[in-house]
Amino acid sequence: MNTAIFYFFNTLAGRSSALDRCGVFITNYALYIVGAILMYYLFIYAPRHASSPRSMLERDGEAVRVLVSTFLAWAATYVLKVLTPAPRPFVTLDHVHQLVHAAAFESFPSGHATVAMAMATAVFFYHRRLGWWLIVYALLVGISRIYVGVHYPSDVLAGWALGFLVSRFIHVIFSKKFSNVA
């Protein structure tokens, strides 16, 4: 099933140069652009437009939680990749449309899917509307990783789950820590 779903998305590659460019853009650049815009919004824009000093402090705390969640999710992905060196689809399967370069044995889990979902989930806890948009974006990132031929669906699902779990864990830890202080 993993291979069948992979081929479903990956065989779409190469049919449309516009779709290929879109998939490559989402895979290679969008994560960094969205991350930079999000950090600007959370650390600079939102605190300056806070209605009171207390809400400004709360916004700073939310921004730190998003940053910590994203960093820890990335770190967890790195550790899992070292502990479980899994081959990518273009190594193990025939007729893969590989649109981007990637290391041959760092497939599990998808770091892009992990980081995108960690950011989305962390933001969702504090800004529901923006969080939903980022969750849709995280789904697109994961699908793009399959489309460009560098991840199996199981890699992406594991990344989404890891990103969600790390952000949820950070949210619970910070919520307990700061509820005890108040």
Image (spheres, rainbow, N blue to C red):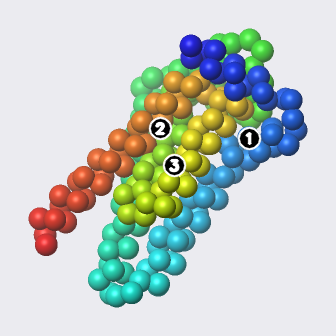
Q: CA distance from mark 2 to mark 3?
A: 10 Å
Decide which of 180, 150 is in the foreground and name it: 180
Q: CA distance from mark 3 to mark 1?
A: 17 Å
The amino acid type found where label 2 is placed reads: Trp
Badge 3 vs badge 1, beta-carbon distance below 8 Å: no
Q: Is residue 17 above or below residue 129?
A: above
Most extreme residue toward the bottom is: 52
Pointer 2 residue: 160
The amino acid type found where label 3 is placed reads: Ile
Badge 2 vs badge 3, beta-carbon distance below 8 Å: no
Q: Residue at x 30, y 52 (%)?
A: 170
Decide which of 69, 8 is in the foreground and name it: 8
Pointer 3 residue: 135
* Residue 92, x across and y down, in percent: 65, 13
Q: Residue at x 32, y 48 (%)?
A: 168
* Residue 147, x across and y down, in percent: 70, 31
Badge 1 vs badge 2, beta-carbon distance below 8 Å: no
* Residue 55, x across and y down, in percent: 33, 80
Decide which of 114, 76 is in the foreground and name it: 114
Q: Residue at x 69, y 26 (%)?
A: 9
Can residue 166 be seen here? yes
**Helix, strand or loop under label 3:** helix
Q: Could you tell me how many numbered marks the image carries?
A: 3
Would residue 9 appear left or right of 182 to someone viewing this image?
right
The numbered mark at residue 111 is none
Query: Where's the C terminus, which quadrant?
Result: bottom left
The amino acid type found where label 1 is placed reads: Gly
The numbered mark at residue 23 is 1
Decide which of 134, 25 is in the foreground and name it: 134
Q: CA distance from mark 1 to mark 2?
A: 18 Å
